[in-house]
Image (cartoon, rainbow, N blue to C red):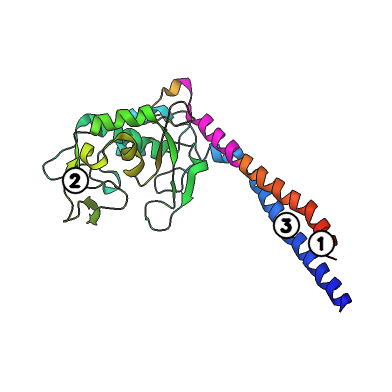
């Protein structure tokens, strides 16, 4: 009976070490993931390049990404055309979106198509034809969001979630029959609700004192969003290092516990 107990304890001992060793290995691999790839990578989408790189010419509001971009010049021309992916900004009957509001949505679309710095926030999606990945919770600088909402607050829409809540008929989005067109101010109430909800939480409203992304910047002065992506990776690696430390601590403690039981 005593011999059986020893064999059982030994079995637990070996199994525990195998599991913790595997966990430690996995966490270590995550912690040394290629940082350059995350900082400088493209979403897997229909119009995105496989790898970011310079472009000779990017159209108008997409120009800040000219030196290193996930979009082509042709894509940026379509981004300014008003109905890329069949999306209709004038979805409320007899309510055309103002030019000042549309300008901000085009900048937002340019960011989506062109930015090579959203890797740390990318997630897989399986329900959309136009892309296999999306970004979620990217920190957007409060001033950029406030300006965007201010420009659009008197424009009209029929839903607070433009990713999920439209009907799509013949390749174009339409308001659902039960919905009501109201101003952005009425639908969203404030800028943080607007930026976080309009594209199903792609953005996270973030104070300018914290690391945050800029939708618009002077590309000749470099891309400030690169440093934000690096910060996010450092945060993630710190969390992974903590988990590895916990695993290593357990590896040290468990033998003593096992011996005390025996």
* Residue 238 at x, y percent in the picture: 63, 39
- At 25% from the left and 43% from the top, the residue drawn is 83
Asked if one can make out residue 72 in the rendered structure from this viewpoint, the answer is no
The magenta segment: 221-236
Q: Which numbered circle lies on residue 48? A: none
Q: Earlier in the sequence, mark 2 or mark 3?
A: 3
How packed mark 2 is, by other alpha carbons closer than 10 Å (few <14, some 14-19, many 20 or more), is some
Observer-side mark, 2 or 3, equals 3
Helix, strand or loop status at disc 2: loop
* Residue 239 at x, y percent in the picture: 61, 43
> Quick check: 190 above or below 180?
above
Identify which residue, 3 or 215, lies in the foreground: 3
Residue 121 belongs to magenta span: no
> Quick check: 72 above or below 3?
above
* Marks 3 and 1, how far apart at CA: 15 Å
Residue at the extreme left? 94
- At 24% from the left and 33% from the top, the residue drawn is 152
- Which residue in the protein does label 2 denote? 91
Q: Is residue 233 left or right of residue 171?
A: right
Helix, strand or loop status at disc 1: helix
Q: Residue 115 lies in what quarter of the image?
A: top left
Position of the C terminus by quadrant: bottom right
Identify which residue, 164 or 209, lies in the foreground: 209
* Residue 236 at x, y percent in the picture: 58, 41
- Which residue in the protein does label 3 denote? 20
- Which residue in the protein does label 1 denote? 258
């Amino acid at each position: 009976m005593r011999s059986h107990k020893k064999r059982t304890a030994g079995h637990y001992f070996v199994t525990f070490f195998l599991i913790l060793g595997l966990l430690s290995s996995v966490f270590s691999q995550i912690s040394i993931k290629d940082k350059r790839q995350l900082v400088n990578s493209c979403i897997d989408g229909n119009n995105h390049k496989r790898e970011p790189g310079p472009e000779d010419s990017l159209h108008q509001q997409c120009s800040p990404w000219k030196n290193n971009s996930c979009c082509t010049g042709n894509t940026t021309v379509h981004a300014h055309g008003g109905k890329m992916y069949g999306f209709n900004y004038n979805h409320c009957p007899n309510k055309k979106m103002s030019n000042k509001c549309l300008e901000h949505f085009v900048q937002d679309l340019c960011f989506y198509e062109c930015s090579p710095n959203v890797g740390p926030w990318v997630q897989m999606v399986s329900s959309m034809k136009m892309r296999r990945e999306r970004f979620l919770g990217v920190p957007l600088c409060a001033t950029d969001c406030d300006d965007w909402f201010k420009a659009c607050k008197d424009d009209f829409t029929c839903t607070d979630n433009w990713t999920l809540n439209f009907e799509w008929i013949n390749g174009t989005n339409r308001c659902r029959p039960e919905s009501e067109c109201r101003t952005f101010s009425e639908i969203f109430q404030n800028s943080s609700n607007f930026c976080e909800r309009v594209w199903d939480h792609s953005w996270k409203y973030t104070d300018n004192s914290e690391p945050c992304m800029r939708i618009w910047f002077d590309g000749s002065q470099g891309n400030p969003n690169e440093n934000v992506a690096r910060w996010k990776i450092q945060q993630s690696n710190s969390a992974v290092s903590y988990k590895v430390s916990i695993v290593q601590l357990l590896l040290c403690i468990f033998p003593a516990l096992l011996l005390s039981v025996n």
